[in-house]
Image (cartoon, rainbow, N blue to C red):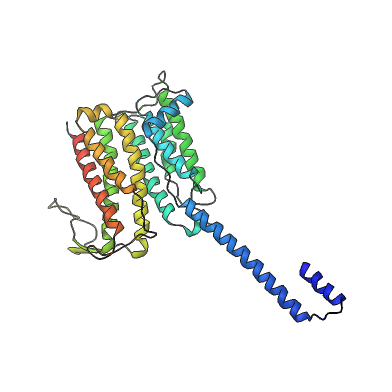
Amino acid sequence: MALKSFIQKFRDLGWTVSDSFADTTTRRQIFKAGGVVIGTIAVIMLLLMLWWNMTPAPFNPVEHARQTAKLEQQAMVIGYTSTETTIELAQTLLDKPGGYLSNDVMPPSVWMDNIPNWEFGVLVQIRDFTRALRNDISRSQSQSREDPDLAEAEPQFNFNSDSWLFPPSEREYRAAIKALQSYRARLSNTGNDEAQFFARADNLAAWLAIVEKRLGSLSQQLSASVGQVRVNTDLAGDSDAVQSTPVASEVVTKTSWYEIDDVFFEARGAAYALIHLLKAAEHDFADILRKKNALVSLRQIIRELEATQKTVWSPVILNGSGFGLFANHSLVMASYISRANAGIIDLRRLMSEG
């Protein structure tokens, strides 16, 4: 409107301004304004992506549990730290900058894949620990009654991780968190023995057996970033073992190039969750670990996993060959994960010994 008024004043003074000039100038102004708007939106999107792409800072599970117990006026009994750590990990998924991104369908989070894969790695560890808590740690024997709150929390954590509507994943996970909080409150009530956390060696071994397989799978996928020919060992160790479908004696495994960063950040998220859960277990299972002389072994596992959280200075996850000119971040991650997994295997065996 200002441009048209300006042109009209020129015409009132007797100047001649062609309509084509006015139309061309108006179009240029529109295009310029549109470019500014689009550029501003692009910058805002980029800044949001950079902010949301930062992983949450670690926390001290024992100190956090103490603060929560004081705030909620609850007794910090055996199992309180592990339960509260699981709750805090789940809340971190939902309340970190950007919120839960795995099920987002709008920009800029729909263009992001690193943090959603990190979220999935954390979520899998929450699911596994909640399952062990429901099936083993909260029960004294196989014929004992399962805890009702854990029976509610475990399937809700296993809800589809990328459902954005009817219902959204966040709603189910918050319901699971609420059930865990109810279990935590009942657990801390020393006058009520319905909720239990049995810090026994066999219960710890049952959870470690799940962790062992998860880390083994991640290690294999990370190592396969360069491709490898491996001997099929599926039936090794049992001469009478059979399988449903025959496979070749040698198998070529290679993670697709476009999945390299996905596996890397999933492993990074799994390690983040395990660091906190293992530190919580160190506190809750301290007597058993001390009796088995296994505290040092557990701390070494935690140290190996902490190495996976170092800053990645490269803007992209590089996938150089094994001994090539360029770095291979997946192989470095596989190194830490494999050593941690070897420690988990030894620790589980130690817990299983009489």
- Residue extending farthest to the top is 191
Q: Can you name the residue that lies furthest to the left here?
A: 239
Number of marks in picture: 0
In this rendering, position of residue 250 left or right of residue 75: left
* Residue 92, horizontal then vertical, whole percent: 45, 42
Nearer to the camera, 174 or 131: 174
Q: Nearer the viewer, residue 216 or 290?
A: 290
Q: Quadrant of the N terminus?
A: bottom right
Q: Quadrant for residue 288, please give it.
A: top left
Residue 42 in the image: state x and y as whole percent. 55, 61
- Which residue does the image show at 28% across and 40% down from the upper left? 302
Residue that appears at 48% across and 44% down:
96
Q: Is residue 32 above or below residue 348?
A: below
Name the residue: 29% across, 43% down: 211
Residue 186 in view: yes
Find residue 230 and report its image quarter: bottom left
Q: Position of residue 271 (x, y in %)?
A: 33, 46
Image position of 51 with respect to 252: above or below: above
Does residue 143 appear in this view?
A: no
- The C terminus is located in which quarter? top left
Residue 202 image position (x, y, % from top left): 25, 33
**Up-down relation of residue 334 to residue 88 (above or below):** below
Indicate the quadrant where residue 85 lies.
Answer: top left
